Amino acid sequence: MKRTVFIFSALIIALLSLFQLSKYSYLSGSTSIEMIIALIAMVFFAVGVFFNKRSFTEKNNLSKEVDPSRIAQLGLSKREYEVLLEVSKGLSNKEIADKLFVSESTIKTHVSKVLLKLDAKRRTQAIQKAKELQIIHL
Amino acid sequence: MKRTVFIFSALIIALLSLFQLSKYSYLSGSTSIEMIIALIAMVFFAVGVFFNKRSFTEKNNLSKEVDPSRIAQLGLSKREYEVLLEVSKGLSNKEIADKLFVSESTIKTHVSKVLLKLDAKRRTQAIQKAKELQIIHL
DNA sequence: ATGATTTTGGTACTTTAGTATGACACTCCA
DNA sequence: TGGAGTGTCATACTAAAGTACCAAAATCAT
């Protein structure tokens, strides 16, 4: 948040400087008005694009990124969440076991706990609920 | 596509008009240079925002909507796609059967065909692939 | 250090999921 | 009218998934 304020302050100062600069460079007769107007137009166009893209990506991030607090609220441990992610990728218990270098029994235990904590009957339902809770994004 | 070209043509013409107008109104001495520069800056800032928002929403629509052509390409029938959607919601075969008023055997048949056509080994993998192929959005 | 949690793993069992195969009715199109 | 494709359903089977219960480590905070 502090960074945002800083960036925008710097941006406004830069624009005001540009503003003054263009005025004086015109008054000193070294540049034509067309050039100044074109320059101003380009700069503000770029600023507009930048400004808009910024707010857009921020909005997207809010809805797409997972917040760890919700995972903690559900009582999901680090490993359980890890397993949940692999489940959501469509892997079988065996495949997850091989990927994480543990036995299939272990994965079954983890999955069972995840199902309990997400109040799901099946892994497919767990995927759905995890998405609704915004702890995974696919 | 035609509409896009039209809109941008109109936009460019409007901007060029504004450009000329500002030059002449300055030469005629009726307006100060500060006002003109400020006006130009505001207009181009707005254009930048508009321009960027446009390309952003277009991209989002492309990635969020499903196109029926891809479903046809995969050889998925209407019913099979319907079952796939229910599967992706996390329902069991039995639950889907009850929802669609058919037997569980029927759902199993459909699911098996869907797995074949999506080249998936499990329903969770089918969900993943369907998402990648952009025939479901969750 | 010790109690709590996490991670790991096993056995034994039940339930879903998925495959293979065959069959019958319906629709649509050539 | 006779296939091609679709939708339905069944049986029999194999393979995963999931539950219950237990237990030994490793980790971690007080």
Image: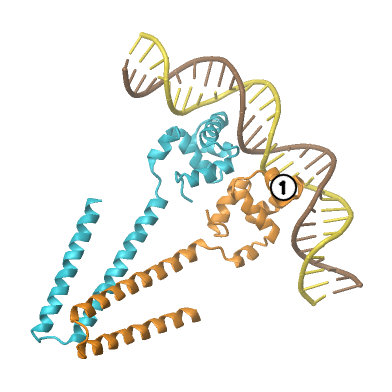
Chain colours: A orange, B cyan, C brown, D yellow
Looking at the image, which residue sits at the far left? B28
Q: Is residue B30 above or below residue D17?
A: below
Q: Is residue B16 above or below residue A12?
A: above
Q: Secondary structure at mark 1?
A: helix
Residue at the spot 69% in from the left edge and 61% down from the top edge: A78
Percent coordinates x, y for residue B84 in the rendering: 50, 39
A52 or B33, which lies in front?
A: B33
Percent coordinates x, y for residue C9 in the rendering: 81, 48
- Chain containing mark 1: A
Percent coordinates x, y for residue B77 in the rendering: 44, 32
Residue D16 figure quarter: top right
Q: How many numbered marks are there?
A: 1
Q: Is residue B94 above or below residue B30?
A: above
The reply to whether residue A119 is visible in this rendering is: no
Q: Which residue is mark 1?
A: A97
Residue at the spot 19% in from the left edge and 88% down from the top edge: A29
The kind of residue on which mark 1 rests is Ala
B93 or B9, which lies in front?
A: B9
Looking at the image, which residue sits at the far front? A30
